[in-house]
Amino acid sequence: MELAYSKEVKIRNLESPESIIEMLNYLYVLLNVKKENQLNEIEESVLNGVILNNFWNFTISEIKHAFRLAVSGKLNIELYQKLDSITFGKVLVGYNAYKQQKIRNFKSKTMSEETNKLTEGEIKAIQSEFMTKCILPYMEERKSLTKPKIDWATYAIFKHFWKSKELTMTKKEIEQYKKEALKYWKEGLTARRNKGERVSLDEVMSNKTQKMYASCVALHHKAPELEKNKEIEEKGINDKL
């Protein structure tokens, strides 16, 4: 993509043929063309004409890149240890199709991302719904819970408070919550075993699951504090009013 939009001088704007000669020498090495099989003066003149008349809108770097792609098999072109007008044409035509597809994919992805980008109003609506349907019910339920509610929905509530920095933890608290998370994990394994599931009581939590468990434990402990802070904040607003 960078080469496609490069500011390097195009073939049509070259002031001397030296760059093309250097490029051909590079391609000879890349294709492993032996000295006796390299173009003679007339053949080279014909190839130069093909380049100037048909591929003048490419840069030297882009042509080299095209041949590197061809050599690596990405253009699906069969190459031999030779360089002539036919080989050059096949590679550049194949590369142009490859490049255009890359550009289309890039534009399509960019447009898709723009289309899927939420407006500020949509973001606020989602946050409001999450607050009404998830956070508030949990905070009410928490008042009667004797132990942490551990599931991915509760983890999402924890992340909401963590990202907003309403919930903070000391290193000591984090270690405590991790230990409690392990305890509840063990209890869960025992409960599943008692129900007839074939699980090992020594099964280890994945890092992702451990994070979820510890976060739910943390939210359980921090919820009363969050509730209190909310009440203080609302009282302060009402006093100002």
Image (cartoon, rainbow, N blue to C red):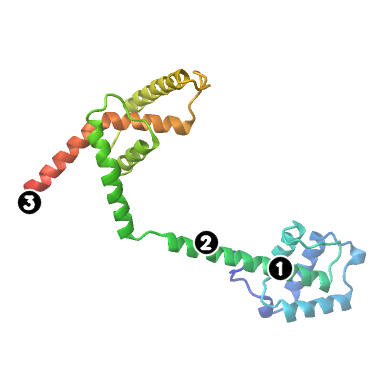
For marks 1 and 3, the one nearer the N-term is: 1
- What's the amino acid at mark 2? Lys
Residue 13, position as x, y percentages in the image: 66, 79
Q: Residue furthest right?
A: 36
| Disc on res. 63 | 1
Between disc 1 and disc 2, the foreground one is 2
| Disc on res. 209 | none
Between disc 1 and disc 3, the foreground one is 3
In the depicted structure, whether residue 3 falls above or below residue 232: below
What crowding class fits label 3: few (fewer than 14 Cα within 10 Å), some (14-19), or many (20 or more)?
few
Measured in 3D between alpha carbons, the distance from the residue under mark 1 to the one under mark 2, in whole angstroms, is 26 Å
Q: SS class of the residue under badge 3?
A: loop
Measured in 3D between alpha carbons, the distance from the residue under mark 2 to the one under mark 3, in whole angstroms, is 49 Å
Q: How many numbered callouts?
A: 3
Q: SS class of the residue under badge 2?
A: helix
Residue 219, position as x, y percentages in the image: 30, 33
Q: SS class of the residue under badge 1?
A: helix
Whether residues under marks 2 and 3 lie with C-beta atoms below 8 angstroms apart, the answer is no
The residue under label 3 is: 241
The residue under label 2 is: 109
Give the quarter of the image for residue 171: top left
